[in-house]
Image (cartoon, helix red, strand yellow):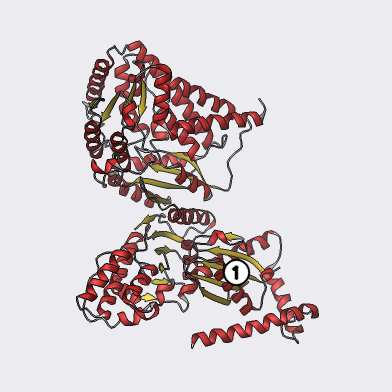
Amino acid sequence: MLLESRVKEQGSILARLGEVCTDPLGYAREWKARTGGLVVGSFPMNFPSEMAHAAGALPLIIQEAEDPITAGHGLLFPFYCGYTRSTVDQAANGELDVLDAIMFGDHCVQLLGAADAVRMSLKNTRVIFFQLISSMCDPWTLGRAKESFEKLREELEDFLGRKVEDDALRESIRLFNRDRQAMRKLYEMRVAGQISLTATEMQYVVKSAMVMDRREHLELVEALVAGATENSPAPEKRAIRLHLSGHFCQAPKPELLDMIEGCGAVVVGDDLYHGFRYISTDVGENGDPMEALAHWYLDRNTGVPCPTRVQNDVDWDAFLLDAMRKENAEGMIVLMAKFCEPHMYYYPEVKEAFEKAGMPHLLIETEHESMALEHIRTRVESFLELVKRRRGAAPVVTSAAQGEVA
Amino acid sequence: MKKHVMGIDFGSTTAKAVVLDMQGNIVAWSVAHMGAVSDAAVHQAVDDVLAQAGLEQKDIGRCVSTGYGRRMLDIADKNFTEITCHARGAVAMVPEARLVIDIGGQDSKTISVDANGLVAQFAMNDRCAAGTGKFLEVLARAMEIELDEMGDIAMGAKQELKISSMCATFAETEVISLRAEGNSKEDVLGAVHQAIATRTLGLVNRVGKKGPVVMTGGVARNKAAVHYIEKALGMPVILPKTPQIAGALGAALIGLDDYKAELAESGESLDEDHDVDAQMAFDKSCVSGCKGDPVAAAQTAPAATSKLKSMLGNLQKHF
Ligand code: SF4
């Protein structure tokens, strides 16, 4: 295929994925009308979507909406994180009505509050709650994780009125693995400079996987990989290579990502949930699929450590420094959603480790409604200037850069 | 080779311009007040600084802009943020400085710097005018006094009052009610400056409290602000002679580095060139502004006159 038409095709794939990301519930409505199937919504970050898929439903991870909070104000305090407030708001406004069931896993206190508020708002929606062990290195962790997933499977079967067969589950696991592998391939190519994908485009690739029919998604991502293998425009060499970290439940706003890259940076890696965190780990394809899912739950925390889980032998900060070395990243921007408690608790450790390692990083606190983009731009530009000027400067200072907000 | 570079700080309420020679000496500087980011005012500062230096825009080898409007300037070859430029400018003015407190019209920032004037860490006020020049401006209006007299009046405070809100609008209400309770202007203004100092201390702690501390930006000219900040820090604050041009100076210095690097790359020898040019100017400057070319002398003569005029004007402003 000619380069020009390949670029065009790449563009239209990304546009399609972007469309799904902009209106995930619209996609769900359209999928429902097309297939007549059931849509099973879930909260991030630990729900094994393969299970709902194996039962013939469309698993959809509920996304933060763009709209400012209105009805949700009456249900959750403003000191809840943007994700939980937005989810409750969407429930209160009737937008989540397209979901036939919702699966809640508890990974933080705010999510628990949001689960109650959503349950109150969606009287006709089946709400299934599952608890997952958060201590990851106890002798009983694996067994408890398996128990939770078994219970979830039973509830799901009860709701759907049909069995989740082992073979179907294995089939779904294989499909999801293939999709994750294709997305990880894009990550590898980006680090190697073989593909030029902006941070927003990468987010579209991953976020759409949380929403779309997996087979449809896989086809598009594999076409992206195939189209990019030759003659793909390499990213600007002089740009600062950045790693983005943080943001668990909600996707960072594309305008923020575009602004960061527009300041002269190129994002080469991330550990965002709407990024590498989501696709880091595959599920074992052989043996008991429930056992494999329980292992996946444990393995993910060593793949990309999560501050909502506790594991003595795993350090998020050490992981980040190591990832950045592999990506040849020169600095890190931490995107912290306002009031995200797990992130707030863990951040000081990351800060300390980065300062010790002399690795520059910048903390940006993001908000659901009011983000002063111009103001943030000044801080991002200053940070990039600092990284750039240090490239050629005598190594007088070992401290790290940190442009906190007051 | 051109012999000068320019730095422009296109701030939220004032525009500043600095011209440097190739050794980094300040040849001229200018500050224009404009009320809000305005093209006209920035051009006023640029025209003024060129007139003072007896130069034209085409004589400038590199022009770097900074400040809020840094991307709006066509004449700038490059732009850098206020953080980078203030750090560089402040260290040029006070080489021993390791912490820069800059309080400008709409933002306040603390920057820890190394000996090269490079930023090590920085912190900025977030999304509101808390603790900035704007905060003082709003409260001056509420107290019905001129911004310039605010600091002097506040120095006469006898009683310690407290303003708890850092939101300019809410603080305005507090100030009005403190006045209504019968507190003196001096005491209320003392509290206003104390509030700025507390906010600044918070920002300082974010980058680490260490000295020597230098203060730049327009608010550095406010005696009471400096006094209360010194008290809050428990450390003396060094004030450069012209704190408000630190950003423009830093921009000009970055421009100078950039220009020299480019010249070095293209193989031009800076020192020799400079010596030859200086000797030529010395040998042939029988006419003011003459660089050995009578035609050019006729053109540069008016520039020299306007430079004199502008210097006189500056002197008058000063006294
Ligand atoms: S982990 Fe953070 S972002 Fe996610 S629900 Fe909890 S507080 Fe919100």
Query: Is A130 situated left or right of A184 in this image?
Result: left
Residue at left offset 60%, top offset 82%: B310
Give residue B274's position: percent from left, percent from top: 69, 73
Give residue B40's position: percent from left, percent from top: 57, 69
Query: Is B179 situated left or right of A394 in this image?
Result: left
Reading the image, the residue beneath label 1 is B6
Question: Looking at the figure, which quarter contains the N terminus of chain B?
Answer: bottom right
Nearer to us in this view, B272 or A280:
A280
Residue at left offset 23%, top offset 23%: A148
Nearer to us in this view, A334 or B269:
A334
Quadrant of res A3 = top right
Quadrant of res B229 = bottom left
Give residue A183's position: percent from left, percent from top: 47, 29
Give the class, few, some or many, for how many residues have Cα within 10 Å of label 1's Cα (few <14, many ≥20).
many
Question: Compared with residue A268, is residue A215 higher up or lower down, i.e. above or below?
Answer: above
Ligand 1 in which quarter: top left
